[in-house]
Every structure is written in structure tokens, then in C-alpha cells.
Image (spheres, coloured by chain):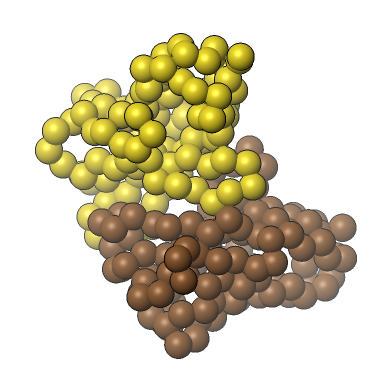
């Protein structure tokens, strides 16, 4: 079955600390992988995506993610978080001929001052 | 327009009433998607439009839900005889082509529907 798992419902980090949000997927074909961010009362904004090539992908706002096929993971990282990064983060997977993305349940990021 | 616009942003309705949710996609985006986001859940796919056609309605939860798109632009999601379990945020997204993942979705801010 196709699925996306984000094991952490909430994560709390101090401002300036590093961040890693986990995403594991199950997908029968070559996966296209995405991270989106949703600020309160806002729609989802694309942070980054992986289709092929270099497995380390750079995105907006200083985020990056690494695709690890052997672990079926696509974890999101940021070296130093800012208070403005507090939001909910969603991982999603799709395929080349499949317009419908499969979404994780999201991880809420809380920033401690 | 510059982004995907959804209206209303909030809607409170009584159980049993019908509601209409509107989505105005980015001009030129041929693909349009409706998703539902319930508290603590990921996004649930509802329906996909390519132009005015809906090749995939498989996500609509029941026959109380319907959607249409006119002129390859504005879309309306209608929920008839609303139930409390319909309470959620309804998100609309659009993309340039049918392969949304190649171009990336652009999402609206959503309509928060509360059925009381």
C-alpha cells in the first residue's frame, strides 16, 4: 500500500538549533517526493521537491532534504531554525504519471525562544 | 490572479444545509484539485479537474459531494445536506499541467467549514 509516515506529531526546538523532520514512504514506483509548509491560516507552500539526480535537495528558506532510497526516507533539515519557521510541515509522495499526491499527517514545529 | 483564491475563508452552517465553496485558480493553470484537511490528519484527495473535465472523482466521500469547473477556471465544491463529519478545511490547488508533481501545486488558503 502507498503511504507516507511522519512519525513525529510535534517537535519542539530552540531558536538557533538544528532541525530534522522525518518522513518515510511506501510507494510501488519511482517516487517523486515533496515537502510543504503550512503556516497558521495559510495554504501549503512548496519547500522543495525531489524527482531524480542529486539526492540532496535544496529548497527555500534554508531547508534541505535528503532522499535515501534504501531507507525509504526523505528527511527535512535546517541547520539553524528561526522563530518564523514555526508551522506545520507535510511530506508527500507521487509518481510520474500520478497527479494525486499521498500525504503524511504532518509535523507541527514549535520554536522555543 | 496572482495566487489561488478561495472563498469564503470561514463558513459555519447548520447540519442539513447545503454549502458551496469556491476556488479561483491561477490564470492559465489547467489542473485543479480539491483536498480536505481534517484536524490532525494529512490531506485527503477529493477530486481533480483537467480543464472542465473531472477524470478522477474517486475521492469524493459520498454522493452529497459534487464539484464543477467552468471555463477552465473557477471551480465550485458543493456539499449537500451537510453533516458534522464534513467539518474540515477544504483546500484547493492548481498547477500548470496534468502532472501536478512536475510543476508543483499552488494552494489556496482554504475554507474552514464548521457544521453545527
- How many marks the image carries: the answer is 0
Depth check: B81 or B2 in front?
B2
Q: Residue B85: percent from the left, percent from the top?
A: 74, 55
Q: Whole-percent x and y of residue B22?
A: 61, 73
Q: Residue at x 74, y 73 (%)?
A: B19
Which residue corresponds to the image point at 52% horizontal and 79% vertical from the top-left?
A: B74
Residue B90 position (above or below residue A64) = below
**Quadrant of the frame with the C terminus of chain A:** top right
Residue A22 % position (x, y):
41, 24
- State the image coordinates of residue A91 (x, y, percent, origin top left): 42, 38
Left or right relative to B93: residue A71:
left
Check the image and report above or below for B45 versus A50: below
Of residues A90 and B7, the one drawn nearer to the viewer in this rendering: B7
User: In this view of the protein, which residue sits in the foreground, B42 or A109?
Assistant: A109
Is A5 situated left or right of B30 in this image? right
Residue at the spot x=84%, y=70% of the render? B16
Residue B103 figure quarter: bottom left
Can residue B102 be seen here? The reply is yes
Report which quarter residue B91 is drawn in. Answer: bottom right
A110 to the left or right of A69: right
Q: Image check: A107 left or right of A2?
A: right
* Residue positioned 70% across, 56% down in the render: B112
Can residue A26 be seen here? The reply is no
Question: Depth check: B92 or B44 in front?
Answer: B92
**Can you say whether A66 is above or below B115 in the image?**
above
Q: Check the rendered structure and report the hue given to chain B.
A: brown
Q: Looking at the colours in the rendered structure, which chain would you say is drawn in yellow?
A: A
Residue lying farthest to the left in this orientation: A53
**Which quadrant of the rendered structure holds the N terminus of chain A?**
top left
Is residue B52 placed above or below B22 in the rendered structure? Answer: below
Amino acid at each position: 500500500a502507498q503511504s507516507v509516515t511522519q512519525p513525529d506529531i510535534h517537535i519542539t526546538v530552540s531558536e538557533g538549533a538544528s532541525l530534522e523532520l522525518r518522513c518515510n514512504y511506501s510507494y510501488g514506483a519511482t517516487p517523486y517526493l515533496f515537502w510543504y509548509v503550512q503556516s497558521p491560516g495559510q495554504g501549503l507552500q512548496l519547500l522543495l521537491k525531489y524527482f531524480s539526480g542529486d539526492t540532496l535537495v535544496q529548497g527555500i528558506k534554508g531547508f534541505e532534504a535528503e532522499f535515501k532510497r534504501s531507507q525509504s526516507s526523505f528527511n527535512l533539515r535546517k541547520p539553524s531554525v528561526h522563530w518564523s519557521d514555526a508551522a506545520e510541515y507535510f511530506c508527500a509522495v507521487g509518481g510520474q504519471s500520478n497527479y494525486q499526491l499521498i500525504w503524511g499527517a504532518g509535523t507541527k514545529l514549535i520554536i522555543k525562544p | 490572479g496572482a495566487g489561488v483564491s478561495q472563498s469564503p475563508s470561514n463558513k459555519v452552517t447548520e447540519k442539513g444545509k447545503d454549502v458551496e465553496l469556491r476556488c479561483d485558480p491561477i490564470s492559465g493553470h489547467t489542473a485543479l484539485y480539491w483536498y480536505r484537511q481534517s484536524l490532525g490528519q494529512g490531506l485527503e484527495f477529493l477530486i481533480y479537474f483537467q480543464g472542465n473535465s473531472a477524470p478522477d472523482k474517486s475521492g469524493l466521500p459520498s454522493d452529497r459531494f459534487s464539484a464543477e469547473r467552468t471555463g477552465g477556471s473557477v471551480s465550485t465544491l458543493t456539499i449537500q445536506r451537510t453533516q458534522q463529519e464534513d467539518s474540515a478545511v477544504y483546500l484547493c490547488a492548481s498547477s500548470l499541467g496534468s502532472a501536478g508533481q512536475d510543476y508543483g501545486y499552488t494552494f489556496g488558503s482554504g475554507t474552514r467549514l464548521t457544521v453545527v
